[in-house]
Image (spheres, helix red, strand yellow):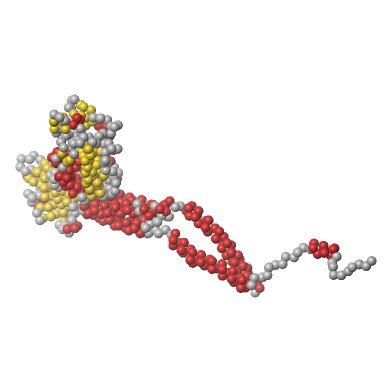
Amino acid sequence: MTTKTGDQESPQASASHVDQPSVKRPPPPETPAAIQTRFRVIAAFWAVIIFLGFPIWWKTTSIYRASLPIEEMVDWADGKACRPVFPLEIHLATPSMQLIEAQHLLRTTQHTLDDLNEFAAHHLRLKLTNGSTTAVHNSEDSMESVKYPAEETADIALTVRLLPQEGLTGPRSELHAATTQLDVFYPPSQVPVPSSSNSPLSAFIAAELQRLYGEEKATIAHILSGNTAGLDSTSPQLAEDIDRRLRRSMKYAQTYHLSFSLFTPKSEPSSWDIEAAVNEYVSPLLQALSPISNFTVDTQVQLYANFAPTAPKPEYDESEVAWTLKKEDLSAFVNAAEWPLNPSIGNGPTINFILYVPDPSQSPLIVKENRASSWMVPQWGGVFLLNPPLSHTEQSGPSNPAHLSQDALGPAFMTFSHQLLTLLGTPSTPASLPLRLQTSIRIRAATLLLSASSTMGSLARLTESLPSIPIPATVATSVSTTLSHLGATCAHLREGRFGAALASARVAETEAERSFFEKSMVGQVYFPDEHKVAVYLPLLGPIGVPLVVGLLKELKRIAAGRKAKGAAS
């Protein structure tokens, strides 16, 4: 039996070959060209990111913050940049005195005023005027002739005219209600001689001036320091009156809208001479108040204007022979739900004045406690109850007149004028309206100066506490304008130019409010950094990880190659 042989392998040899482990061969080495290509690709990606992508991202997402004078703004808010003063220039006219006697009277009166003054920020400067002769006396007892340029002349607060009068035992004064003039009548025997250090006439003039400007001084002290505790001459009653007046007055605005409304529960009266009444009683006052604020006027007539269903009804008082409203019910008199009263819409608040003509069956209508026919609603407006003469007919009984003439409207609009002054914060003294309006100018200048300065401090703190909010160039411009006009206001106050000071303070207040309430500044406040992470991470994560890993590998290869070259050398 023969065995077949040839090229076939035995089963044992085949199994042995299969059981041998397979040898893993390394990949072929990279060519220098492939390494260079990979390096260029990674470098190109990172070059695009660094030199194109990052600048575009930075440009499109960066927040513009204009440079602001933070330190100067904080100084104004802290009162370091300006300490407002109010030097009132008072002219002393002495037509019947010799020049040397008038100068001596001026000197002794100024000494007395300085001794009585408790508030250094508010002081009175006497200036002697007698024809073409002018002498100025300052707090250091020096007199010199001063000629102010027309635009640099200080405002004249008051003119005191000294007039001799026979038969007087002591001096007396008379203040003109329609001008800024105070007449002082004195016995000719009380003219101070140059050798005397004081005189009854000097003491009387100083006391009268202190009395005239007592409320103004206390009000400015209250505004600047928040209280009048530092003024010993201010009575508790005056301090309480000032505090109540400031609480009842409207907040200052550049423009006020005055709304005069005629309401009646019946169909009459249906017309009124409102234009003539406004021109006669309101327009002159608004013209005098124009340096302080702007005013617009609108009117309306509303028929069948009934009380609110929940409002207490008038009660008939037999002792007064009139229908009466209780004081505690006056707050519910205005039917705000049904009466078409003008709200405070637009630029500036609305001051409402209501002329109410009651139903003939409830006429006359008065306030029970004081028999008054008018009252004021703090920070809102005023109400006047007009009880016109009734006409009687056999068919319809008593009825109101169909038309209200200017004379019939006179008492109401005189009351409205007084209420308007109160709502605007005008002091109640002195009796001269021009002097009270001058006081209002000084008070408003002080108020706006502090308000604009405080707004600058708030804006400075806001921009520092929120570095992510943008600061547009318009804000920087408004801040610059505000600071410039604040400086001008302070300079005008020091020189006694209160009208110019108020004009600058109004501009400063307007620009300060515009810069603080810039709409584009508040958008970033509601987009915190957490939102940015939530937006960028899903986008940059998948792209950034491969790029960073590739860059690290390439840097590792370069470092290894340099190390190998160093070892070989």
Of 9 and 177, nearer the camera is: 9
Which quadrant would the N terminus be assigned to in this image? bottom right
| Vertical placement of residue 132 versus 273, above or below | below
Of 267 and 320, nearer the camera is: 267
| Vertical placement of residue 66 versus 569, above or below | above
Which residue does the image show at 18% across and 29% down from the upper left?
A: 322
- The image position of residue 452, as x and y in percent, is 30, 51
Which residue does the image show at 17% across and 59% down from the upper left?
A: 149
Visible residue check, residue 359: yes
Residue 424 shown left or right of residue 392 in the figure: right
- The image position of residue 215, as x and y in percent, is 22, 42
Visible residue check, residue 200: no
Quarter of image, res 405:
top left
| Vertical placement of residue 403 versus 523, above or below | above
Which residue does the image show at 35% across and 59% down from the upper left?
A: 473
- The image position of residue 170, as x and y in percent, is 10, 40
| In the image, farthest residue toward the front | 395
